Image (cartoon, grey):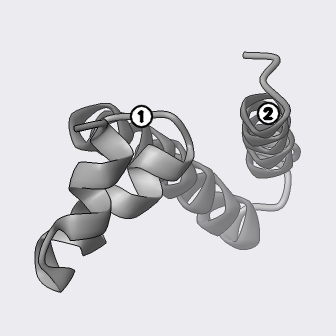
């Protein structure tokens, strides 16, 4: 039985953990690590934006640079150029 057949026959709750990662060619663990790393980078970008809001001369492009880098990474993954 192929992996996609296993996912299709899995109960709904379990399938919710595996269907999306499989749709992007990853295991649950691979997707978990990527998403956690991605969320950490977003968190840091948000912190830089907060610092910039308080002191405009600090972190002038830090948040936008991170967002651009994250966008490029997601775009490359979506098109298979990672």
Residue located at (67% from left, 71% from top): 54
54 left or right of 7 in image: right
60 left or right of 16 in image: right
Q: Distance between the residues labelled 2 and 1?
A: 21 Å
Q: Do the residues labelled 2 and 1 touch (CB within 8 Å)?
A: no
- Image coordinates of residue 19 in percent, x first then y, are 38, 61
37 left or right of 64 in image: left
Extreme residue toward the front, this view: 1
Residue located at (83% from left, 61% from top): 56
Residue 33 position by quadrant? top left
24 left or right of 61 in image: left
Residue 51 position by quadrant? bottom right
- Image coordinates of residue 5 in percent, x first then y, are 31, 52
Q: Name the residue under label 1.
A: 26
Q: Nearer the viewer, residue 21 or 4?
A: 4
Residue located at (42% from left, 46% from top): 22
Q: Mark 2 points at which residue?
A: 69
Image disc number at residue 39: none
Q: Which of 68 and 78 is in front in this view?
A: 78
| Crowd band around label 1 with a 10 angstrom C-alpha radius: few (<14), some (14–19), many (20+) | some
- Image coordinates of residue 39 in percent, x first then y, are 45, 52
Q: Quadrant of the C terminus?
A: top right
At mark 2, the secondary structure is helix
Extreme residue toward the bottom, this view: 12
Q: On screen, 30 above or below 14?
A: above
């Amino acid at each position: 039985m192929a992996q996609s057949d296993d996912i299709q026959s899995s109960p709904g709750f379990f399938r919710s953990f595996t269907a999306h990662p499989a749709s992007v060619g990853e295991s649950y663990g691979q997707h978990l690590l990527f998403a956690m790393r991605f969320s950490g980078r977003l968190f840091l970008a948000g912190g830089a934006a907060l610092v910039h809001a308080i002191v405009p001369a600090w972190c002038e492009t830090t948040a936008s640079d991170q967002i651009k880098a994250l966008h490029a990474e997601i775009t490359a993954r979506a098109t298979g150029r990672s």
